[in-house]
Image (cartoon, grey):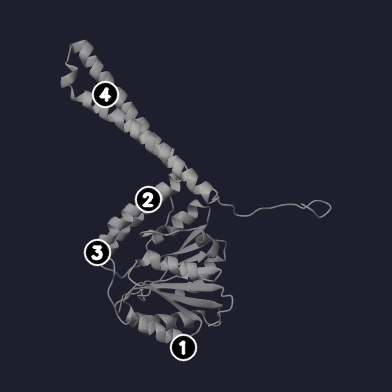
Amino acid sequence: MDIQDPEVSVVVPLLNEQDNIGPLYEQITQTLTDVYKYEIIFVDDGSSDNSFNVLAKLQKADAGMRVICFRKNFGQTAALSAGFAHARGKVIVAIDADLQNDPADIPKMLAKLDEGFDVVSGWRKKRHDNAVTRLLPSKIANWLIAKITGVKLHDFGCTLKVYRREVLAETKLYGEMHRFIPALASWSGARIAEMVVNHRPRTAGTAKYGLGRTLKVLLDLVTVKFLGSYSTKPIYIFGGMGLVSGLGAAASGLVVLYQKLAHNFPMNRNPLLVLTAVCILATIQFILMGLLAELLVRTYHESQNRPTYVIKEILESTGRDGEK
């Protein structure tokens, strides 16, 4: 493995995959050796089996391989984030350690990236997973994510993805947000492609995720939508809700007045009066929350000198005397 200025960094997050690490390492090296200058970064997410010892033995024999070991289990998103932060390649490949992703797909995805894309996402079109606990929730989640983010991918959950380094440079990952990287990148102007990849049955180890993960994904989706659409203008969403609440207060208040004046209905016995008061309070709260959020957002960006835009490139001309 050539580790001097690698072109490609392969990041492999793992948890209790002692039986899959060796075969995966062999498949990656066989696929990339003599084709790319590359490095492999394994991130042990607090495994409780013999995974770390297997990694240590491989790393001792291959100085170009690196191993990052967490003190405890922090989750796949944290493992990927650590791998991305330590990667040195111009292109970063993420792949699962369970051998269900096929390393043979990596060269094809890298070739697709060279067509002018910034992210190439794998699509497990023919999956070998449990229909109830994995496939059905995945289909629902993928449909929701595509609908809400506007990024038309079939398989956001496939770990096998290829990224240009600059796409990940400003991406901070929390929760289960690794699956939303294509959406976050797309909102910054990145070009996204999708490619059908081979998905193999699991032959060793056990799956780490089930139905319980779906709720986390849905909650993260709310966060991603807010960050993508309103992170620099929160008053739009809070102010919008405040205006709707204010209109509701006005409508119910007018009905209360009409009932009092036209039918002499006692106002103190009218439940709509309570609704009017609640809507007025909600209007005030939403608008104040929007203003506070605006202050927080501006403090965040200005304190770090962080722009609210992303520049792709700058074209400049020099003066006749050679000076700008």
Q: Is residue 308 left or right of residue 11?
A: right
Residue that mark 1 sits on: 61
- The circle on residue 175 is none
Q: Which residue is mark 3?
A: 133
Per the model, the C-alpha gap separating discs 2 and 3 is: 24 Å
As helix, strand or loop, the secondary structure at mark 4 comes to: helix
Judge the density around disc 2: few (<14), some (14-19), many (≥20) Cα neighbours within 10 Å: some
Provide residue 196's location: percent of width, then percent of height: 43, 66
> Between marks 3 and 4, how big is the CA–CA gap?
46 Å
The three-letter amino acid code for the residue at tag 1 is: Ala
Task: Give the Cα distance between marks 2 and 4.
Answer: 32 Å
Q: Which residue is mark 4?
A: 252
Among the two numbered marks 2 and 4 on one chain, the one whose residue lies closer to the N terminus: 2
**How crowded is the residue under tag 4: few (<14 C-alpha within 10 Å), some, or many (20+)?**
many
Mark 4 residue type: Ser
Q: How many numbered callouts?
A: 4
- Which residue does the image show at 49% across and 51% down from the upper left? 187
| Mark sitting on residue 223 | 2
Q: Residue at x 56, y 51 (%)?
A: 310
Q: Residue furthest bottom?
A: 61
Q: Earlier in the sequence, mark 3 or mark 1?
A: 1
Crowding at label 3, few (<14), some or many (≥20) Cα neighbours within 10 Å? some
Is residue 158 something that shows in the picture?
no
